Amino acid sequence: MKQYIDIDKWERAAEFRHFISYSHPYFGVCVNLDCSKAYARAKGEGISFFLYYFYRSLAAANEIPQFRTRIEAGKPVVYDEVHGSPTILRDDGGLGYALLLWNADFETFRIQAEKEIAGVKAQTALSTSKDRPDTIYYSILPWLCFTAVSHPLNLPRTEGVPILTFGKCFEEKDRRLMPVAVHAHHALMDGLHISRFLERLEESLNKS
């Protein structure tokens, strides 16, 4: 479900009208988040660390309205909930796109996600059939401790979907850190909203 936003009554009306005309309206930040407890829990319980932090990040994104806001026919709309669309490395070495549906229950989310990922891995061609605006795009780079990221964007057709990128974990002063990059459409959110998302995500990753 989605709701159209009345721009004239929207607190971001001025920012939306300003940045919607930009030829490159996306901006991004890259930080290292403490994921020590999340990593230890995943390994201790024998569950996928990737799916665990993916679930936590999707939960944090759904808590922030700006991460659920999109552009449709030049107008802002907000979805009740959004899902995750990660890039998956297929068995043949190519790339595939998965659609991991959000579910507040982690076990339900995990089972559905594992089935979806297995199906994408077995594909032999790149399919965009599941591309939809009520998602967040994910890029996973488990081989790199990156400090900056850029993405190819089809800007004339963008729906304002945020992009999250997760990199290789590393240890620093008895903590396990993970690089995380966030790219977002400036007509829909500012650095404040990204900061709130990152704070909630790190807090969630380090819950006991």
Image (cartoon, rainbow, N blue to C red):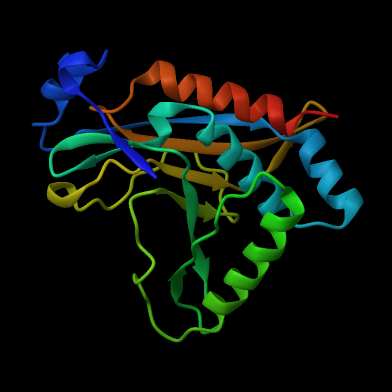
Does residue 195 appear left or right of residue 23 in this picture?
Answer: right
Q: Is residue 134 above or below residue 189?
A: below
| Quadrant in the rendering for residue 97 | bottom left
Question: Whole-percent x and y of residue 44?
Answer: 91, 49
Quadrant where the N terminus is found in the figure = top left
- Picture residue at 12% right of the left edge, 21% below the top: 18
Q: So how many labels did they put on this image?
A: 0
Residue extending farthest right: 44
Question: Whole-percent x and y of residue 178?
Answer: 64, 38
- Nearest the eye: 123 or 173: 123
Instruction: Please indicate, yes or no, whether residue 170 appears anywhere in the rendered image.
Output: yes
Instruction: Please indicate, yes or no, whether residue 147 appears anywhere in the rendered image.
Output: no
Does residue 151 appear left or right of residue 178 in this picture?
Answer: left
- Picture residue at 66% right of the left edge, 27% below the top: 202
Does residue 15 appear left or right of residue 197 in this picture?
Answer: left
- Nearest the eye: 166 or 57: 57
- Picture residue at 14% right of the left edge, 31% below the top: 20
Q: Is residue 99 above or below residue 80?
A: below
Question: Whole-percent x and y of residue 126?
Answer: 37, 77
Q: Is residue 85 above or below residue 82?
A: below
Question: Whole-percent x and y of residue 47?
Answer: 81, 56
- Picture residue at 24% right of the left edge, 51% below the top: 153
Quadrant where the C terminus is found in the figure = top right
